[in-house]
Amino acid sequence: MSPSPGPWPPGAPRATAGTPEELLRRLELSVTRRLDGMLQGDYQGLLPGPGSEPGEARLYTPGDDVRRIDWNLTARTASTHVRMPIADRELETWVVADLSASLEFGTAHCEKRDLAVAAVGAIGHLTARVGNRIGALVVQHGRPLRIPARPGRNHLLGLLHRVATTPRAGDRQAGSTDLGAALAEVDRLARRRGMVVVVSDFLSATEWERPLRVLATRHDALCVEVVDPRELDLPDVGYLSLVDPETGETTEVQTSRADLRARYAAAAAAERQAIAAAMRRAGADHLVLRTDRDWLLDLVRFVDRRRRRRRPPARVGARP
């Protein structure tokens, strides 16, 4: 079965043109229509405490911190005033987009690569709409593509265009990628405390758990795992040639054997469980997007669960 073009959920309108501009425009409309308002009214500062940016001023009262006295305003009004700080709300988000050869595979509504690009677009539109800064590191064979973190819609559209038009493995030399090295590089680039989102299938031959743990200690880390159903179980189609897209190694298997399909499904489930356990140990949130599911609905449910989990508990027995 050949995958359908575009990272669109079942029943959603698809772009008639295959240009990156058309696909990104449709993606923006889909994301804003399905997720609009879900992050409103739940904005927290980056650091605990009253904040660091100067805010409104008021008259000094006994007990106020003398370090907050606004001496210029005090001199103009002949009355002691203090300047109340506000929280710094500018969030810096870095996205690690894995576009290695293993993502150029799909048997359902789209390829894993298309779903990864859609996930990057959804995260970008959610975080950049309120003036936040967003940057990206595109992982591929060779040197990763680095896109600096900047605010603004034009920067976001340019970032998504560069991610969507990244050459495929068929247009360049295929090979294994180093996801752990990319995470270590993001740790050096993200100097401010913010958010780091890793979009990948996490089928990397290199160790990535330790760099992810280091990132999660300083930033709010989210791992978006992209999965295709054929990676979890084999169909009964007789002889099947399997090709590793990163190494080029070819293996022929007889899928008519029920024991082989059972062993494959068990090994695939164990691999995914190990990936999820590594993310939990690192302290990162985990979101699974599948090419055979409505990925926007899964994203909506994840955002809602995340908001409910992080909402402060109600005070029991508090007086009105």
Image (cartoon, rainbow, N blue to C red):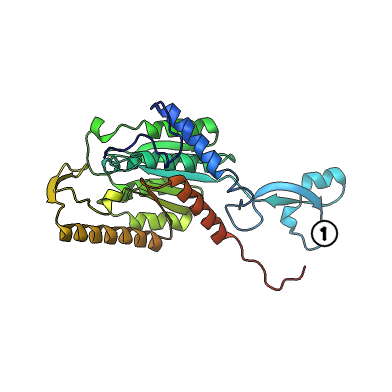
Give the x, y percent position of residue 226: 36, 48
Q: Secondary structure at mark 1?
A: loop
Let me know if residue 204 appears in the view: no
Q: Amino acid at mark 1?
A: Thr
**On screen, residue 264 above or below 226:** below
Number of marks in the rendered image = 1
Residue at the extreme bottom: 317
Categorize mark 1 by other alpha carbons within 10 Å: few (<14), some (14-19), many (20+): few
Q: Nearer the viewer, residue 28 or 5?
A: 5
Give the x, y percent position of residue 301: 50, 53
Choose top left, top right, bottom left or bottom right for residue 95: top left
Let me know if residue 94 appears in the view: yes
Give the x, y percent position of residue 89: 61, 47
Quadrant location of the N terminus?
top left
Q: Report the side of 242 relative to 277 (left or right).
A: left
Q: Residue at x 36, y 38 (%)?
A: 114
Q: For mark 1, what is the residue?
A: 61
**On screen, residue 145 above or below 96:** above
